C-alpha cells in the first residue's frame, strides 16, 4: 500500500483537554462530524459532564443530591458515543511540534503521552484566591466545581453553622446567599442562618448592573434577611483554634462567622496553552478567532479558558458562562473534525434568580457604552408582568441603552418577578441585528392577561429611550 493511501485511511486523532460544558460539547460534535475519528477527553475531575449551574440549588436543598447534576457518566461516552474519557488525569504539557500531550494520572502518578492531529483546549477557569491573611484556614471555601461543592456540603463546619460570610456579590455570591438562607440549617441556636455579603464595589453585581438597578435587588436581599456591606473588602480572615472565627475588612470592621465563601471571581486556566506557544488575549484567556482557532493551526480553544468576541463592540472579552462554553465547544469540535463552523460572538447576556427576583443583562450599561466611545442615552421604567386585574401580577423594571446619534440599541438590564429571560433574549437578538431603538419601541408584541399587560414593557421602555435619540 502506498504512503498516500495510508495517510487517507488514517483516523483523525482529536484530543480535548477538559470536560464539563465546552469539552464534552466539542467532543460530541467532533464525533458527529467525523464518525471515524479517534476522540479523547482528558479530565482532571472524576466527573466529566455535569451541570455546574445547578450547584447552588443542591446546596439550598431544591435538588436532593449532586448526582442529579451528572449529565453523562464516563462509560456512556464510550458505549453510546465512541468517545474515550480519561478521568482523574492532568494534562501538563503540550508539544505542538510533535503534536503530543503529556499527562499524569492523579491517583497512580503514571505518566502517558497522547498523540493528536487536532487539539481542543477546554481547560476552563479556576477561582481567584485573594492575597489576604488567613485564606487557607479550615472553614474557608471556594465553590467553583463539582468537587468544591461536594467538599463544602460534606463539611461538618457547614452542616452545623449558624452564620456565614460571602466575599463578593457577583452571580455565584448572590446565588449562594439565597441557598444558605433557605437551606433549612437550624444551627446551634435554633435560628436560620445569618448571611452577610461583603462587596468592595459600591453596589452588588458590579459587572452586571448599574447602581440604580442594583439598588432594586439590594432591597430584596435585605428584605429576605441578607446583610449587605458595600465599599469594603475582606482584609483578613480571623481564626480561633485553627478554625475560622470571622473577618476583618479594610475599615477595621470585624464580623464573626462560622465559615467564609470566597466568590472573588475566576481566571482562565490557560497556562498549558501559553507554554506551548499559544497566544493569550484579553484577561490572559486563550485568544481565538470566530472559528475557535488559536494562532497554532491544529490547536483550538473553547469555553472558560478562551476569549469571546463581543458583537456590539467587536472587541474580545472574557465572560465565563455555560451558554458560551457550549456554543464555542460545538464550533471548536466541528472545525477540529474538518468543518467550517463559525461562532458569531456574544453580547454578554446573563441571568440569575435571587429570592423573588430574576435579574438579567445583555449588552452594555450606559457607563460601559461611554467607555467604548458611544454617546449613550437610557431610560428606566417600572411596569407590571400581567394585566393589572389578573392575579399574581409582579413588578418589572427595564433599562434600555441606545446610542444618541445612531439610535442603535446598545444594551439592557431587566429586574422583575417573572418574564425577565424572554425580554432579555429579545433584546440580545436586537443587539445582534444592530436594531434601532425605534424598532424595539414599535415591534408587534403579543398580549394575553396572564402573561403581559396590554402595553408590552419593552415597547414602553424603548419608546421612552427613543425620545432621547437625535
Image: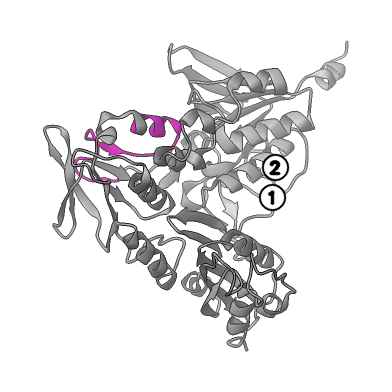
**Residue topped by disc 1:** 343
Q: Quadrant of residue 347?
A: bottom right
Identify whether 103 is placed above or below 384: above
Alpha-carbon neighbours of circle 1 within 10 Å: few (<14), some, or many (≥20)?
Answer: some
Seen from the viewer's position, the closer of residues 450 and 452 is 450
Determine the residue positioned at 69% across, 46% down: 291
Range of magenta residues: 130-152
- Tell me, yes or no, whether the highlighted magenta stretch contains residue 142: yes
The quarter of the rendered structure image containing the C terminus is: bottom right
- Tell me, yes or no, whether the highlighted magenta stretch contains residue 28: no
Seen from the viewer's position, the closer of residues 290 and 398 is 398
Mark 2–mark 1 Cα distance, whole angstroms, equals 6 Å
Seen from the viewer's position, the closer of residues 57 and 34 is 57
| Label 2 or label 1, whichever comes before in sequence order | 2
For the stretch drawn in magenta, the main secondary structure is loop
Alpha-carbon neighbours of circle 2 within 10 Å: few (<14), some, or many (≥20)?
Answer: many
Q: Is residue 388 left or right of residue 6?
A: left
Q: Are marks 2 and 1 in contact (CB under 8 Å)?
A: yes
**Residue topped by disc 2:** 331
Identify whether 398 is placed above or below 177: below
Question: Where is residue 284 shown, x and y percent of the image?
Answer: 47, 47
The quarter of the rendered structure image containing the N terminus is: top right
Q: Is residue 364 visible?
A: no
Report the number of numbered marks.
2
Question: Where is residue 388 shown, x and y percent of the image?
Answer: 57, 75
Seen from the viewer's position, the closer of residues 36 and 113 is 36
Q: What is the secondary structure assignment of the residue under circle 2?
A: helix
Question: Where is residue 34 shown, x and y percent of the image?
Answer: 78, 29
Amino acid at each position: 500500500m502506498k504512503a498516500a493511501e495510508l495517510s487517507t485511511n488514517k483516523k483523525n486523532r482529536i484530543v480535548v483537554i477538559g470536560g464539563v460544558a465546552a469539552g464534552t460539547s466539542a467532543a460530541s460534535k467532533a464525533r458527529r462530524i467525523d464518525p471515524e475519528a479517534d476522540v479523547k477527553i482528558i479530565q482532571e475531575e472524576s466527573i466529566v459532564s455535569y451541570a455546574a449551574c445547578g450547584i447552588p440549588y443542591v446546596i439550598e436543598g431544591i435538588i436532593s443530591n449532586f448526582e442529579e447534576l451528572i449529565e453523562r457518566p464516563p462509560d456512556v461516552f464510550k458505549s453510546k458515543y465512541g468517545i474515550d474519557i480519561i478521568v482523574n488525569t492532568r494534562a501538563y504539557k503540550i508539544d505542538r511540534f510533535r503534536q503530543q500531550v503529556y499527562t499524569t494520572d492523579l491517583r497512580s502518578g503514571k505518566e502517558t503521552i497522547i498523540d493528536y492531529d487536532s487539539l481542543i483546549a477546554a481547560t476552563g477557569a479556576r477561582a481567584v484566591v485573594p492575597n489576604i491573611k488567613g485564606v487557607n484556614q479550615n472553614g474557608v471555601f471556594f465553590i467553583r466545581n463539582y468537587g468544591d461543592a461536594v467538599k463544602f456540603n460534606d463539611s461538618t463546619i457547614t452542616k452545623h453553622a449558624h452564620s456565614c460570610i460571602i466575599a463578593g456579590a457577583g452571580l455565584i455570591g448572590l446565588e449562594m446567599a439565597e441557598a444558605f438562607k433557605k437551606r433549612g440549617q437550624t444551627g446551634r441556636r435554633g435560628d436560620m442562618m445569618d448571611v452577610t455579603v461583603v462587596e468592595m464595589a459600591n453596589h452588588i453585581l458590579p459587572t452586571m448592573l448599574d447602581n440604580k438597578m442594583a439598588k432594586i435587588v439590594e432591597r430584596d436581599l435585605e428584605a429576605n434577611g441578607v446583610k449587605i456591606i458595600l465599599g469594603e473588602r475582606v482584609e483578613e480572615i480571623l481564626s480561633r483554634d485553627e478554625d475560622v472565627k470571622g473577618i476583618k475588612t479594610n475599615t477595621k470592621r470585624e464580623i464573626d462567622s462560622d465559615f467564609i465563601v470566597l466568590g472573588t471571581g475566576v481566571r482562565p486556566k490557560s497556562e498549558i496553552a501559553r507554554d506551548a506557544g499559544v497566544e493569550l488575549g484579553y484577561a490572559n484567556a486563550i485568544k481565538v478567532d470566530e472559528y475557535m482557532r488559536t494562532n497554532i493551526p491544529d490547536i483550538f480553544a473553547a469555553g472558560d479558558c478562551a476569549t469571546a468576541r463581543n458583537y456590539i463592540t467587536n472587541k474580545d472579552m472574557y465572560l465565563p458562562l455555560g451558554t458560551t462554553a457550549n456554543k464555542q465547544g460545538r464550533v471548536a469540535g466541528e472545525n477540529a473534525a474538518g468543518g467550517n463552523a463559525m461562532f458569531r460572538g456574544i453580547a454578554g447576556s446573563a441571568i440569575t434568580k435571587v429570592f423573588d427576583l430574576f435579574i438579567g443583562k445583555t449588552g452594555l450599561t450606559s457607563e460601559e457604552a461611554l467607555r467604548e466611545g458611544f454617546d449613550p442615552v437610557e431610560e428606566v421604567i417600572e411596569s407590571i408582568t400581567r394585566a393589572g386585574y389578573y392575579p399574581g401580577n409582579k413588578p418589572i423594571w427595564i433599562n434600555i441603552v441606545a446610542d444618541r446619534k445612531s439610535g442603535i440599541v446598545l444594551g439592557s438590564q431587566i429586574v422583575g418577578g417573572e418574564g425577565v429571560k424572554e425580554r432579555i433574549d429579545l433584546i440580545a437578538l436586537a443587539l445582534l441585528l444592530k436594531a434601532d431603538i425605534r424598532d424595539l419601541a414599535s415591534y408587534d408584541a403579543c398580549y394575553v392577561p396572564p402573561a403581559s399587560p396590554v402595553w408590552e414593557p419593552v415597547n414602553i421602555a424603548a419608546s421612552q429611550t427613543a425620545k432621547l435619540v437625535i
